[in-house]
Amino acid sequence: SSWLPCHAIDLKQDGELMAHVDSVRFSGGMVAGISLLSSCIMRLRPGADAGRDPNEGVVDLLLPPLSLYVLSGVSRYQYAHELLPMVSVFEDMDGIETVVEREHRLSVIFRDAKQDE
């Protein structure tokens, strides 16, 4: 597969990245990002067309600086993703809570090109 040009997202501390599914019109089956500068919490929630309550079945991902995330398959097409507000709480699988204070965030986003059908 081929890659689309990468791009950067420069999000100030009070900036918002609302829940969305990246366009499937031009990009393919994978969206990946490298997180730089600040930790944040990315929330995956069932998309509007998943037929479920968007507040049920959410998945939170803790993205520390220099982490890589990949959305593909179900997470790419059936879940919307968003960044939680400046101060949020991440709970790990053991129930341990961590307060995450999102500051200035920079990320580099990669997408594969849509394959001809």
Image (tube, rainbow, N blue to C red):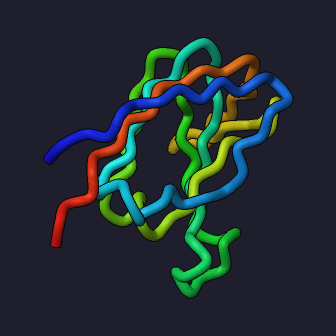
In this image, 5 relative to 96: left or right? left
The front one of 89 and 93 is: 89
The front one of 72 and 54 is: 72
Q: Farthest residue toward the bottom? A: 51
The front one of 5 and 86 is: 5
The residue positioned 35% from the left and 43% from the top of the image is 111
Q: Residue 1, relative to residue 23: is it above or below? A: above
Q: Quadrant of residue 76?
A: bottom left
In this image, 62 relative to 115: left or right? right
Give x and y (percent) for residue 23. 48, 60
Query: Which quarter of the image is occupied by the C terminus?
Result: bottom left
Q: Residue 115, relative to residue 90: is it above or below? A: below
Q: Residue 60, relative to residue 73: is it above or below? A: above
The front one of 88 and 65 is: 65
Give x and y (percent) for residue 28. 30, 56
Q: How many marks?
A: 0
Q: Quadrant of residue 80?
A: bottom right
Give x and y (percent) for residue 2. 18, 43
The residue positioned 38% from the left and 46% from the top of the image is 31
Q: Farthest residue toward the top? A: 37
Give x and y (percent) for residue 39. 62, 22
Q: Farthest residue toward the right? A: 14
The residue positioned 64% from the left and 49% from the top of the image is 82
In this image, 34 relative to 46: left or right? left
